[in-house]
Amino acid sequence: MSSTVPALLQEARAAGGDRVALRFHRGDQVDSFTWIELVQQVERWAAALAAAGVKQGDCVVHLSENRWEWIVADLALHAVQAVHVPLHSTLTGPQLVEQINHCHAAFGFVSRPDQARKLADCSDKLVVDIQFFSYEPCEAAIGRRAVKLLPAVLENSDIRDGAALLQRAAEGGAPSALATILYTSGTTGEPKGVMLTQENLVSNAQASITLFDDQPTDVRLSFLPLSHIFARTCDLYTWLISRCELCLARARETVIADCHTFQPHMFNGVPHFFDRVVRGMRDAGLQSAPDALRNLLGGRIRFCVSGGAALPDYLFEYFEERGVPILQGYGLTEAAPVIAATGTTRWKKGSVGPAIPGVEIQISDDGEVLARGPNIMTGYFRNPTATAEAIRDGWLHTGDLGKLDEEGWLWLTGRKKEILVTSGGKNIAPVMLEGLLTADPIISQALVVGDDRRCLAALLVLDRDRTQRALGELGQAEAVLDRTSEAVRALVRERIDQALKDVSAHEQVRHFALLEHPFSIESGELTPKLTLRRKVIEQTYAAEITALYADQ
């Protein structure tokens, strides 16, 4: 059994041949690559990268939305045995530069002018001399270098050099070699680079796919961000193993239309997407119409897989009753990512399933879920302290709380760590955001919420004197300092937006409530060290939080 991605790719070409491997939109038309054509693209890109100076072990960052080039770039980086460092396309310039500097990247891919501009605007913060290749023409220079148009670079590459590189990687690449670094938020909001090897990625894809009845004739739709490990392992690398047809959605907003175009048999999603599907059907009056759900999803859908956040029971029941089961899974970036999952033969409402083959799950004395297996990361890049905290005696400490039933199925019961996971599967570090908010003089305390919600909200306590002064500076000294005052709420909205101007879209606080009384030790809302007792505060203000999301 292959233990590296290049070996999987070579096997897929040999078995797939002239069958269609990948379909995608190019402008208004649907284009495709066969398995042979796909590998030829990879070989040409690998040759170009090597000619440009990319060497084995180099970190190469990648800032792009989902597109066919993302997939070819990933596979070409495996072929030259470089380390792929995907950057989430929704991040801001300062966030991107921080990660580029941290991994000491010397090369990078960038998709479009708007993405290049984010980096160009922060060039003065770059401490590395980095060369970027772009998929589309970009006029902006990043750092001291102009961005090179990749299609022009490819014209001078020799596919035979790339074929040799891929063959060498397939035959001699080490399973223990570092394949990728993925940045994930810690509890303080500082990014940590998860290091995953070839074995981590391939073993997880091989174990995950045993749970499903994927066939080479199947069509899989992919719309989750490939920069996240969920889509990368469970769409991209499982595709290499099953050798089915992979179809790329154009954007998050076009998934339903793309379902009609490609008629998939399966896809991976997050709870937020499935909730949107149900709401859309109800709005159209189709929630009870026979076969309406299946037809909406293209007519051939057999099952969906949900991960990234907890799946509400009502969504599970709605899809199951209509013959399109949502199979649940659980994992972390640090586990490449799948730890447990349900398959197509059996599932239990509310459970994320048993451990996948080769992975062990254990529950610690305090209820934390621990995992061990060939998929567990080697550690956090340049962060031995965080690594030692996360992996102890060979077990990954997930930070999640759970229990195992008599059959070994995992049931999650809460989170030990201070990380929010939105219904869209985005990991949010609330401590970092709260620090940004309370840096504003008029906001004395802040609690950010949004677990299993579509967006973030905040409970805020204002400094009355400073807020009054701020209103006076705006010529509104006569404004009543009341929580419902339009002047006060407009001021707070402006301050929130300013405080969070450098964080990504999914980290923005969309709603807020102004509290009358501050959090205190006496009320049980603060510890003696003056840290927030989140559960207590959320229970105390449950009604206010519910009201914030009333229109969602």
Image (tube, rainbow, N blue to C red):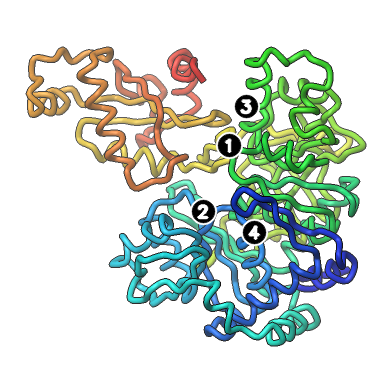
What residue is drawn where x is 51% and y is 67%?
A: 109
Q: Are marks 3 and 1 in contact (CB under 8 Å)?
A: no
Spatial distance from mark 4 to mark 2, Cα to Cα?
16 Å
**Cα–Cα gap, marks 1 and 4:** 18 Å
Q: Residue at x 36, y 20 (%)?
A: 513
Q: How far is the residue under mark 2 from the one under mark 3?
A: 23 Å
Q: CA distance from mark 4 to mark 3?
A: 26 Å
Expressed as whole percent of the image width and height from the top left, the position of residue 384 reads 53, 66
Residue nearest the viewer, comparing 550 with 335: 550
Q: Secondary structure at mark 4?
A: helix
Residue at (46%, 71%) from the top-left corner?
Answer: 132
Q: Quadrant of the N terminus?
A: bottom right
What residue is shown with label 2? 88
Q: Badge 3 is on which residue?
A: 276
Q: Amino acid at mark 1?
A: Glu
Among the two numbered marks 3 and 1 on one chain, the one whose residue lies closer to the N terminus: 1
The amino acid type of the residue labelled 3 equals Arg
**Disc 1 target residue:** 253
Identify the mark nearer the N-term, 4 or 3.
4
* Percent position of residue 200, x then y: 72, 63
Secondary element under disc 1, as helix, strand or loop, is: helix
Q: Where is residue 99 drawn, in percent x and y?
A: 45, 62
Of mark 4 and mark 2, the one earlier in the sequence is 4
Amino acid type assigned to the residue bearing label 4 in the image: Trp
Q: Residue at x 59, y 55 (%)?
A: 227
Q: Residue 148 shows which numbered tag?
A: none
- In the image: residue 399, left or right of residue 32: left
